[in-house]
Amino acid sequence: MQEEIVIPCSLQQHMKLKAYLDELELASSIPDLYWLPVPTELLNQIQLEHQDSCGPYAMALDLSDDRVVLETLVRAQNQLHCACIALAEPELTRHMLDYLNLLLVKD
């Protein structure tokens, strides 16, 4: 399974996406790195079971001038090492890619 998905983008798309993600306050403490929240309905069984102790869950999005890199690892915001930290299921990956594609073509 792929751990990172690279999506080419223009500088204009990059700037629009960055502004949108900043507006939603999804920025991490690392420049150009954002945390995309994972919808509860797309969590796997163990993530649902660990949601109160380990969640919320997010996927990392790295913005570069000419590309967007989606990391498919679902991370727990309140835990560094746990069985609930795992690669995204195909349905979640597809959802996030569809969401990013909508944002990249958004005016």
Image (spheres, grey):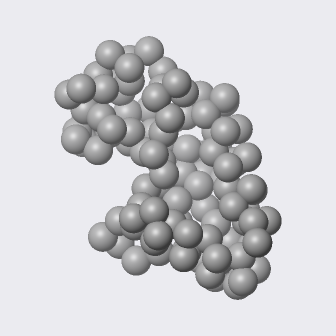
Left/right of residue 70 with respect to residue 7 in the rendered view: left
Quadrant where the N terminus is found in the figure: top right
Q: Does residue 17 sit above or below 41 in this rendering?
A: below
Query: Where on the picture, by quarter, is residue 65?
Result: bottom right
Picture coordinates of residue 31, whole percent (x, y)? 40, 77
Residue in the picture at 68% in, 71% down:
67
Left/right of residue 78 with respect to residue 74 in the rendered view: left
Picture coordinates of residue 42, whole percent (x, y)? 54, 27
Picture coordinates of residue 84, whole percent (x, y)? 36, 27
Residue in the picture at 64% in, 76% down:
16
Left/right of residue 96 with respect to residue 19 in the rendered view: right
Query: Where on the picture, by quarter, is residue 27?
Result: bottom left
Name the one closer to the observer, 96 or 2.
Answer: 96
Residue in the picture at 29% in, 22% down:
50
Q: Does residue 28 sit above or below 78 in this rendering?
A: below
Query: How many numbered callouts?
Result: 0
Picture coordinates of residue 85, whole percent (x, y)? 37, 33
Left/right of residue 6 with respect to residue 52 in the rendered view: right
User: Does residue 27 show up?
Assistant: yes
